[in-house]
Amino acid sequence: MVEVLVTRQDAPVHPTKSKARPERKLHRGHFAFMRALAQGLDERASWDRYLRLEGEHADLKTVRRTIAWIRDAFAAAARREHKPGTARLILLDPDRFAAAPALPTLAEFALARGLEDFSEAEQIEAYEAAYSSGSVGGRGGQGRARPSRRARVIDHQLQALRWLEDLVVQDPRPGDRVAAWLNPSLAARLERAGLPTLCELVKRINGIGARWWVQVPGVGERKAARILEWLRANESVLKIKVGDHAGVPRAQLTPTALAAVVPEATALVPYEKFVLPSGLDGQEGRYRAPPAKCLIVAANDHEAIAAWLASKRSGDREIGELSSTQRSYRKEAERLLLWSILERRKALSSLAVEDASAFRAFLADPPPNWCGPRHHQRWSPMWRPLEGPLTPAALRQSLIILRSLFTFLIGQGYVVGNPFAAVTLPPQPQRPPGSSRTLTFPQWDHIDSLLHVETEPGRRLRRGMRWLYATGLRLSEITSVKCEDLEPVDYETAGGGVATGWVLSVIGKGGRRRQVPVPAELVDELENELARHGFERQVGVPGNQAIHVMARFDAGLEKPPPWSASGLYQAIKAFLAQAAAGLEGVDAQQLRKASTHWLRHTRGRHALQGREGQAPVPIQVVHSNLGHASVGTTSMYLTTEARRADEGDAGVGASSGVRRKRTSPGEGGAGS
């Protein structure tokens, strides 16, 4: 048993800086562990069974500190009940008292004393005379000595622990602070991560899933597993449930499992989970057209929106698979539907011009409970329809899309008017595409030089960055293409020879298919990754055709899942922020603001501009590769470049590379 030094009774075991810090509470595991110690059960097994949340048993400092705190807490509770004797009893170490020697059986005693031929009554009489221990009953029975002081101390301690447990043990409640139930150092880390209560902790776990702990510095996978185990053991008293998805890696969860995380409700949930309440579903909408003349099969406003979204489906996509345009349109209709029911208390088909104006003001200043980070996916309870107030450009786009929605509904005979037609749009921003959202050649070279981490996530990030830059694909396009979309082509070189290259078949906006050239070295890298993870090296073999170019090979599945658009976006944003850390001035500012779409703009500008060793690409080719609807859109990159040259900033860092942070004399030395 671990030796315990009992501290002075009026001294706090865990001093904290804040006097407002809640007192740690005793739970049944503390009592079960101390009963096990008192009875001499295996300490390590008892720790792992009852107090695993406190840390590893191998950490003797934690074990000693925890046992000392538990004993002090027990004694303090007894003193509060005016039981000073019980307080002292709990602090006694039974090992200080010797155990009584074991007595022989009656048969052993008789044999040792030469009494085996005497009657049993005579043997018992001699036994009692020898040991003065009371009667010994039963043929061949075991002698029972008077219990030792150690045994009496243990018995009294167990009785005291049972009494104290019934008196002080509490069940955890959702609003309790984590510091009341968890190890102080662990609780402090959770609090610093914005998780002060058990309720907030469970919400975070359910909202993010199995890797929730990544966002909590100092809490690794093992500590997170212990927390999850404790929360699940207390689900019945907490009345809040940790979802089954929280114990399974995200890549291994099926769409059905994810869909079950958030139930359907009339609340701030995504469009597909939103339940229209009776009376506000639009069946009796104020501005509904006569149902007999309606051209769509829609019994309510939710189904009318679904019909509108379906009308935007491209011919090559499967039913239920939304294009980027459909997702963008759904987002705007979703916000309006939620606001109409939850805030305005009106059916969508009952909205008037005044309501449309109020919604415009709402988007410019939404309440905090409507807002959340973009990276929370639609299956998550932490998903919210907005990130914050819309910029003028985003607000203008939203209102234009909603005008389109009602124009469609009017055309199909569902409603009689368009409330958004009378709402003033914010002015059109006068900014050509990519005017301030492109990178210079030195900036890109700096980024490319940092893409060298040789792990699966590092190689996948490198693949995503280089493919986006080399092809100019949109985020939704790069995450949807597969090996089967790659095709080798032969072309004539400048010297008259024949070489093999690659083209990628992409379905872009409006369902338009285009062929985009891909550098051979990028395909080579992809084939190396396939071979590294046990697949055939050639991208074109039948077994590889369904594998996404942006596959997550670290998922450990037979068919690697694709990297999600949000996952790729967040990874690139985080990487660019790190890349900016070593720079200063405009270069650092550009990289901190940059995103996946900047790489598309950068590709267009760099292709048209050309650089040493690379001739400019004809504008018609760039227009085709980027999938612009009009060559005029592509030509704006030329206008942008000319304007930047006139302003003198066309080559930020071009003469001497990107501008790195200056070092102090002590950091760099002479000549640095």
Image (spheres, rainbow, N blue to C red):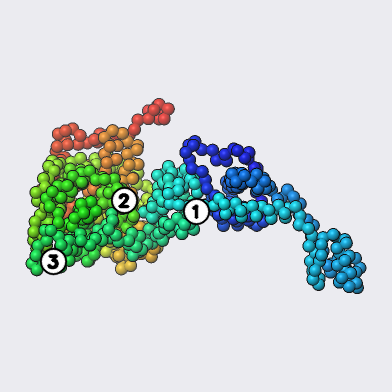
List the residue tagged with mark 3.
Answer: 296
Query: SS class of the residue under badge 1?
Result: loop
In the rendered view, would you say 29 is above or below 665?
below
Can residue 3 be seen here?
no
User: x, y percentage for residue 600?
Assistant: 22, 48
The mark lying in front, picked from 1 and 2, is 1
Q: Residue at x 14, y 42 (%)?
A: 429
Q: For this view, does 378 lie left or right of residue 62?
A: left
Query: SS class of the residue under badge 2?
Result: loop
Name the kind of residue labelled 1 in the image.
Asp
Residue toward you, 479 or 295? 295
Q: Residue at x 48, y 43 (%)?
A: 22
Q: Residue at x 46, y 49 (%)?
A: 220
Among all residues in the image, which is located at the extreme front? Answer: 82
**Crowd tier of the residue under label 2, counting other residues whose Cα lies within 10 Å: few below 14, some 14–19, many 20 or above:** some
Can residue 416 be seen here?
yes
**Crowd tier of the residue under label 1, counting other residues whose Cα lies within 10 Å: few below 14, some 14–19, many 20 or above:** few
User: x, y percentage for residue 426?
Assistant: 13, 43
Q: Earlier in the sequence, mark 3 or mark 1?
A: 1
List the residue tagged with mark 1.
Answer: 171
**Crowd tier of the residue under label 3, counting other residues whose Cα lies within 10 Å: few below 14, some 14–19, many 20 or above:** some
Q: Earlier in the sequence, mark 1 or mark 2?
A: 1
Identify the image quadrant of the C terminus.
top left
Find out whether the residues at labels 1 and 2 contact each other: C-beta distance under 8 Å.
no
Query: SS class of the residue under badge 3?
Result: loop
Q: For this view, does 212 lie left or right of residue 329?
A: right
The mark lying in front, picked from 3 and 1, is 1
Q: For this view, does 494 lie left or right of residue 146?
A: left
